Image: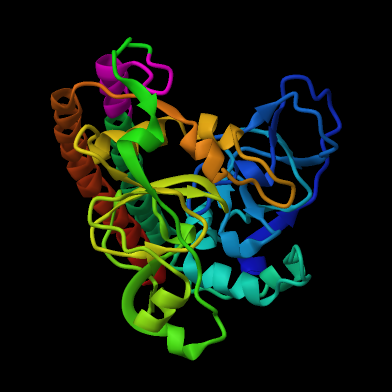
């Protein structure tokens, strides 16, 4: 069946009082999620499109971001959101969000997107998407399985958030705020005095002799929130490229810190590597535990981002980094925190794997 045979686009407008009405923009739709969890109320905007509880909100601008959620209430949304409603007797409303939120649909939608800077897809293209729908009684069984899997996924995500919050609470309990020395440690020093700062650069991209070698070379885009250790890089340079860019090999355990495009990504090297100019990295002295420094930088990300300067893009200069002051608690206490963090990270890894497995189950149920 084509999408237009079991669902329709809704173009209703909100004509009543807007006071206290939930407002949803593209920024509120989380990629890959089926349920809406964030919205505004009484925000200043010119949105007029109406949506009702149970309808699907599809981000039609930059559809490759894969934003489509079921509405938990009535409200107003952006014109860049397509509102889709199930046709009674053709598909269960509970199943429609999963039909929309799947790889096959978004691959099809992306093929029909038009525009260069901000591509959009129209209902005229989406309505011809084809899917094999089972009878209504089988749809009910399928929908129950899918929502059960999704609820389990949500419970794992809550556990993951609780684990992160536990680490943050323990960190504050043990150290206060290490950037302002709220625990009043006697050792409170310039970051450059307790680390060696390592910079990076980029070999000439047009010289093939510099690339596809054996030396790890990393960029900020490669750092992930999912793991704090980096063991390999997307690109590798040759010895000639390494020498041409006057690079430095960072030892295992170096704290990577991105200071441009974007500011604030943090990781620790699990292998020797060098980097591009988007980093200011730290090799810790024996007075500073690298996991403690890693979490300190992560903990103070918003503050550090606020120090960035520049018009085209923000950057933290080497001078700013060198003037940062940090509390240096007893190394035994720092080492104790490392053990706490590693245990939490292990638990977080298992939870993330469980979430990935549930996503695979959901995709399998939809695709089959």
Relative to 309, is 233 on the left or the right? left
Of residues 242 and 316, the one drawn nearer to the viewer in this rendering: 242
The answer to which quarter of the image holds residue 320 is top right
Q: Give the residue displayed 27% in from the left and 28% down from the top.
A: 167
Q: Give the residue displayed 47% in from the left and 50% down from the top.
A: 258
Of the 4 image quadrants, the one containing the C terminus is: bottom left
Q: Is residue 365 above or below residue 280?
A: below
Residue numbers of the magenta segment: 165-181
Relative to 42, is 55 on the left or the right? left
Residue 179 appears in the figure: yes
The answer to which quarter of the image holds residue 287 is top left
Q: Give the residue displayed 22% in from the left and 36% down from the top.
A: 289
| Rendered location of residue 213, percent (x, y) | 35, 83
| Rendered location of residue 15, percent (x, y) | 86, 32
Q: Is residue 301 above or below residue 233?
A: above
| Rendered location of residue 76, percent (x, y) | 74, 36
Q: Give the residue displayed 66% in from the left and 41% down from the top.
A: 309
């Amino acid at each position: 069946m084509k999408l237009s045979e079991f669902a329709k686009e809704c173009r209703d407008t909100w004509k009543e009082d807007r006071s206290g009405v939930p407002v949803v923009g593209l920024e509120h739709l989380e990629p890959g999620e089926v349920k809406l969890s964030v919205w505004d109320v009484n925000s200043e905007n010119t949105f007029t499109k109406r949506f009702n509880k149970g309808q699907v909100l599809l981000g039609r601008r930059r559809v490759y971001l894969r934003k489509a959620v079921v509405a938990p209430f009535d409200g107003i949304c952006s014109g860049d959101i397509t509102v889709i409603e199930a046709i009674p007797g053709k598909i269960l409303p509970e199943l429609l969000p999963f039909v929309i939120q799947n790889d096959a649909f978004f691959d099809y939608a992306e093929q029909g997107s038009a525009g260069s800077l901000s591509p959009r897809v129209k209902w005229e293209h989406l309505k011809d998407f084809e899917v094999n729908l089972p009878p209504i009684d089988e749809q009910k069984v399928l929908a129950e399985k899918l929502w059960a899997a999704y609820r389990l996924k949500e419970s794992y995500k809550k556990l993951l958030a609780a684990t992160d919050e536990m680490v943050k609470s323990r960190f504050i309990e043990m150290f206060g705020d290490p950037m302002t020395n709220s625990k009043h440690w006697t050792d409170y020093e310039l970051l450059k005095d307790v680390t060696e700062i390592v910079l990076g650069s980029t070999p000439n991209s047009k010289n093939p002799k510099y690339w596809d070698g054996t030396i790890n070379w990393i960029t900020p885009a490669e750092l992930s929130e999912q793991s704090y250790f980096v063991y390999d890089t997307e690109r590798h340079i040759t010895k000639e490229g390494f020498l041409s860019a006057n690079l430095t090999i960072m030892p295992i355990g170096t704290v990577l810190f991105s200071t441009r495009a974007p500011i604030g990504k943090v990781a620790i090297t699990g292998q020797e590597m060098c980097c591009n100019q988007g980093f200011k990295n730290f090799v810790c002295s024996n007075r500073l535990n690298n996991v403690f420094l890693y979490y300190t930088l992560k903990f103070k990300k918003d503050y550090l981002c606020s120090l960035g300067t520049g018009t085209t893009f923000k950057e933290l200069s080497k001078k700013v980094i060198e003037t940062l002051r940090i509390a240096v608690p007893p190394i035994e206490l720092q080492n104790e925190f490392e053990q706490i963090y590693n245990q939490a990270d292990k638990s977080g890894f298992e939870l993330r794997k469980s979430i990935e497995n549930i996503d695979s189950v959901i995709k399998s149920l939809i695709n089959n």
